[in-house]
Structures are given as structure tokens and as C-alpha cells.
Image (tube, rainbow, N blue to C red):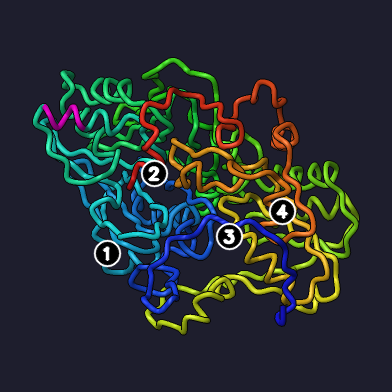
Amino acid sequence: MSNGVKQTGALKLPAAPSVELGNGQHELWTGEYYNEGVAGHGGLFDKLNEECGVFGVYGHPDASSLCYYGLHALQHRGQESAGICTTDGEKFNYYRGMGLAKEVFNNETLPPLTGSSAIAHVRYSTAGESKLANAQPLVFKYREGELAIATNGNLDNANIIKRELERKGSIFQTTSDTEVLAHLIARSEHDDILDAVKDALKQVIGGFAFLIMTNDKLIAALDPNGLRPLMMGRLGDAYLFASESCAFDAVGGTYLRDVQPGEILVLDRDGFHEDRFAESGKRSICAMEYIYFARPDSDIDAINIHSARKRMGKRLAMESFVDADVVTGVPDSSISAAIGYAEQTGIPYELGLIKNRYTGRTFIQPSQELREQGVKMKLSAVRKVVEGKRVVMIDDSIVRGTTSLRIVNLLREAGATEVHVRISSPPFMNPCYYGIDTPSRKELIAAMNSVEEIRKAINADSLHFLTQEGLLDSIGTGSAGDQSGYCMACFNNNYPTEIVDTGKVGCACD
């Protein structure tokens, strides 16, 4: 080809959603602005979407400001909407909006959020319609007063419960799983809020981390398998909760411990109380938190994410060494693994790919040719680094394969003579039912094709995935035989809970 891209007899990749323009061309998105949804599998990049991030404060006079900075630290977990709800002990004050935390909150919207307790939420980015109604925290009025809920995860049986509640007269205002929990709490025979929450939590199945607030209580709860991360911290006399420990660092707080599976923690005027709504099941925290979702400076279960990813890269090098000139990682989640691969092999690590962090939203519609080259809005290859070189490209996962193909071709266009792809996770073969927005199994390239077929499809000279045993050893404990406390269902189809609704894939917010 004239552009220097090596052609192969590649199989056809699963297509991203497109719109027929009537002239034989296709538009690559259907939203209002140019790069709407580019972070998701429906846009230019087929990376997985995290579900959400939650942050909570109890007992601090600047609770809303702490939430604002906490949401900034958790922004990578969701860019679609942000919200904060506070209480002064008598009434709620809340504000939610579409966009990033810095776009939603300013000198006008933040000061009215007074009170010493608060819960906050960021929602993941989608390629479809934005729904303010689904922005969290959701706020309700019920017989005992006001109730606010923020969640990270997914309730697998939410649709089943919702249909039953609707038959009994419940009227739902959103499409969020979170509202299902609110209805269960409101319909509980228990007047005491803690008993009502425990009663509601016993009826739901899935992976979830809830922050629930009334005018005088803040409640944190984690599903019986601990599928989603949730941890507790302190800032002076105040208590903090967050999806990741990096949010504590952002506000000057300190990490105390992770919330345990099936545990429910309560803060009120009488102090801090530990309780349970369910016996702890087999600990099964999502392995993708370590591979992709969590920030490198976060710790989950006392395991640092950056260190774990470096070990993944080192193990990948031991399992699949290839002679090359440079190692580069796909920004940002693959950088740590790329450093580990380079250290293990002695091949120099270089910034062969640069991420453009300022694409933002633009309503300017470029030409069709530029649309098809839209990957370059997000990534650029450094020609002087890769030109004439054999490149090892490290990435964290392959979903549909469309992103990998685009990046491999980007490196070839910049003059790379060979591109060897190494993936710091096993092949992603199964959908997630616990809060990660994944395509259906038939759209997952690893579910439908062999490694060699995928290699041809993404135009790579070689391809290797980290083994399941290598992944678990890299995280820090265990072996592939017992999964050692991690959910690996997306790799091995071994789901830690019963899946009662196979059509319920994605996030509780949607």
C-alpha cells in the first residue's frame, strides 16, 4: 500500500456502530459532537468502560469540597456525569450535571451544597444518549424522610425485581438499577433505615458498592463477593469512602481499610458501627481493576496497581520474549506493564505513542476522510522513536480488535518495520454482568477467533496474551486453580454468582 501499512489476509473485525450516509460512506458516530463516545466500544476506541466511581464524607464541614476533589481523582472511572448530595442534618442539598466534575461544579453550583456529610458520584461515558435522569446520586423521599444513593456496579436481577415491583404499583423514574434498591428500601416492612437497607440488599444479586445517605446516617455496603472496590479512610475526625485510595490522597486523607464482602458500615451521631447484611462469599474482586480500570497510584487490598502492572509486564516478557529495538505502551493504562516488559528484557522503553489529552468536545464536523483517521485525534505515533525499528507494543486488553488494528497501523505508518503486540491480560472472551460495559460475546474477537486469527486481524507480526496463571501471580497471590479471590469470568467464564439475566450487561447507572 502507498501508506506503508503491511497488508495481510486478515479476517473482518466486528464493526463499530455506524450510520449509512447514502453515498457508500459511513459516519463513525451518531452523537451530537465529533468525538462523543470515543472512549467507549461504540466509538473510535473499543476499550472497556468502567462502571462508575463513588466518594463519601461523614463529619467534615467542607464535605462538598472534599467530594469535588475526590471526584477529580476518580474521573477516570466515569466522564458522562457527576453529582454531589450533602446534608446538614436536616435537609438535602444536591446538584448533578452532564460532563466532567470540573464542568458540572463551579463557584455557583458548589457553595450551596452545605453540610458535613455528603456522597458523590461519577458516571462512565457512553456512546449513546446522555440521560441526566440517571446521573447520581439519586435522591428520593420516602416515609422516613430523605434518601440518597450512589452506586458502583450492577444488579443482575434488577429487571426481574423491577417488573415485580411495577406489578405491585411502583412507578420508576429512571432506568437505573439504583432506583430498584430505593424502592426495595421504601417498601420494606422495617421502619429503621438500617434494617430496611439490609432487607433490600439481601434481595439483590450482582457486583455492587453502595453509598446510602439519610439526614443523619451514612451507610456503605459491598456485595457478598466483593466484586467492586470500596474502601474507607480518615481525614482528621471525618470518615471517607471511595472506590479507590487515590481519592483519599487527593483530599489529604489516609486509607484505613477495604470494605469487606457482605459488610455494611454505618456512621451516625452515635459513631461508627460495623455490621453485615450477608455472609461473606468467596472473595472475587474484579481482576480488570488491576489490569486496566484503577489508577496506578491506587492500592486495592493493599496491592499497589502500578507495581502489579509492572509485574504483569515482566511476566509477559518471560512468557513471550521477542527480539526488538524498542518497547512502547498504549497510554495510559499500559505504561506500567510496558516498563516492566522493558526492564525484564533489557529492551529500551520509549514513548512511541503519545495520547492527546485535550480533544474535548467539538461540534466541528471534519471531512469523512478525517473521520476515518479519527484515531489520530486521541493517539499519535512518535516517528523518530519507531521509524526503522522493531517495536513491541504493550496493551492491557483486546476487546473487538478495532483499536489494536488502528494502533498497529499507526505505528507502521510512522515507519516501524515490525510490530509485536503483547497483551498484559488473558484473552477477553466473556461479557461482564457486574458493572463493566462490555459487548456481547459474539462481538468479542477472542471469543470467536484463535490467537493466530486475531494476530492477522490486527495486522501484527506476532501476538501473545498473558496467561491466567501469570496474571494471578503478577497481582500478588495465588494460582489459576483457585482464582485466589479474583473474578476472572471475562477470561474463563467462571462467574462467582448465578447469572439470572443474561441480557443485563453493563452498568447499574444505565
User: Closest to the observer: 459 or 48?
Assistant: 459
Which callout, 4 or 3, points at the residue further toward the start of the chain?
3
The kind of secondary structure element at disc 4 is helix
Identify the disc placed on residue 455.
4
Residue at left offset 22%, top offset 46%: 174
The kind of secondary structure element at disc 1 is loop
Label 2 with label 3: CB-CB less than 8 Å:
no
Q: CA distance from mark 1 to mark 3?
A: 40 Å
Q: Would you say residue 165 sits in the magenta stretch?
A: yes
Q: Residues within 10 Å of mark 2 (few under 14, many from 20)?
A: many
Identify the disc placed on residue 109.
1
Residue 28: quarter of image: bottom left
Which callout, 1 or 2, points at the residue further toward the start of the chain?
1
The kind of secondary structure element at disc 3 is helix
Q: Amino acid at mark 4?
A: Arg
Q: Residues within 10 Å of mark 4 (few under 14, many from 20)?
A: many
Q: Would you say residue 234 sits in the magenta stretch?
A: no
Q: Amino acid at mark 3?
A: Thr
Closer to viewer: mark 1 or mark 4: 4
Q: CA distance from mark 2 to mark 4?
A: 30 Å
Q: CA distance from mark 1 to mark 2?
A: 27 Å
User: Closest to the observer: 253 or 29?
Assistant: 29
Q: According to the image, label 2 marks what residue?
A: 507
The kind of secondary structure element at disc 2 is loop
Secondary structure of the magenta portion, mostly? helix
Which callout, 1 or 4, points at the residue further toward the start of the chain?
1
Q: Which residues are magenta?
A: 163-167
On the question of residue 404 being in view, the answer is yes
Q: Is residue 253 above or below residue 32?
A: above
Label 4 with label 3: CB-CB less than 8 Å:
no
